[in-house]
Amino acid sequence: MIDRAFVHPLDLTGKVAIVTGSNRGIGLGIAKGLIAAGCNVAIWARDRQRNDEAVAECAQGPGRAEAFACDVADADSIEAALDGTTASFGAIDGLFANAGIGGGGRMPFLEQTDDDWARMLEVNLTGTRRTIAAVLRNCRKYLADDFNVFLVANDKFNLYPQIAACADMQIVEQFKRPVLNRTERDKAAYAEVIFR
């Protein structure tokens, strides 16, 4: 038997996280890891059947999963999934904005239409901004008056100022540090931002 404390040094029992694009791949892996640490996870993805399959895969606990159909390119879909998540789990403690659709890797660049490109940007950039802003707006009602929200992500598209404006928050501090990826070619700085 594997010692849970060794595998998951953080106890996330009773915490709630949303993972977008989590009915397969990296998102499902994130969801399973959180659930194994005791976290309750809202699986947000478009395909209802795959969502149900992901919930079944996560049934080993100790945290639990529930799926909510969500297309992050659609603001109404985000709000509906957020309403469902808070109705089922209560206050949200974390968000993993993982949803994204492939472009260059799945379709040769010269074969992409303008519509393909626009959809990819709508999901990968605008959808990420919308999702983070919606969750931050929701979280504000559960936080103390003097709170900080710490976001870590590669913000090479400078989305944080837009996210702060959409969430009616302000950036109070920003740190940038280089992080090497697996190929060690990308030395772009990761942004770590504190919102209030």
Image (cartoon, rainbow, N blue to C red):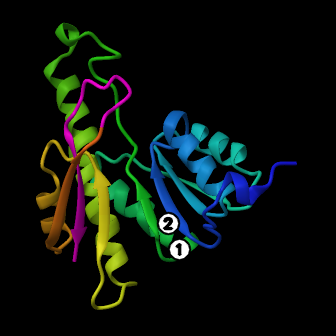
Q: Residue at x 31, y 67 (%)?
A: 150
Q: Residue at x 21, y 70 (%)?
A: 167
Mark 1 neighbour class, 10 Å CA radius: few under 14, some 14 to 19, many 20 or more: few
Left or right? Give the position of 3 relative to 6: right
Left or right? Give the position of 165 relative to 151: left
- Counting from the top left corner in percent of width and height, residue 9 is at 64, 60
Q: Quadrant of the C terminus?
A: bottom left
Q: Is residue 123 above or below residue 79?
A: above
Q: Amino acid at mark 2?
A: Gly
- Counting from the top left corner in percent of width and height, residue 23 is at 55, 40
Q: Residue at x 69, y 48 (%)?
A: 58
Q: Residue at x 41, y 62 (%)?
A: 80
- The circle drawn on residue 177 is none
Q: What range of the chain is rendered magenta?
A: 180-196
Identify the residue position indicated by label 1 in the image: 87
Q: Secondary structure at mark 2?
A: helix
CB under 8 Å between discs 2 and 1: yes
Q: Quadrant of residue 54?
A: top right
Mark 2 neighbour class, 10 Å CA radius: few under 14, some 14 to 19, many 20 or more: some
Q: Is residue 85 above or below residue 187?
A: below
Q: Is residue 101 magenta?
A: no
- Counting from the top left corner in percent of width and height, residue 84 is at 50, 66
Identify the residue position indicated by label 2 in the image: 84
Q: Secondary structure at mark 1?
A: helix
Q: State the count of labels.
A: 2
Q: Amino acid at mark 1?
A: Ala
Left or right? Give the position of 124 relative to 46: left
Q: Is residue 48 above or below residue 86?
A: above
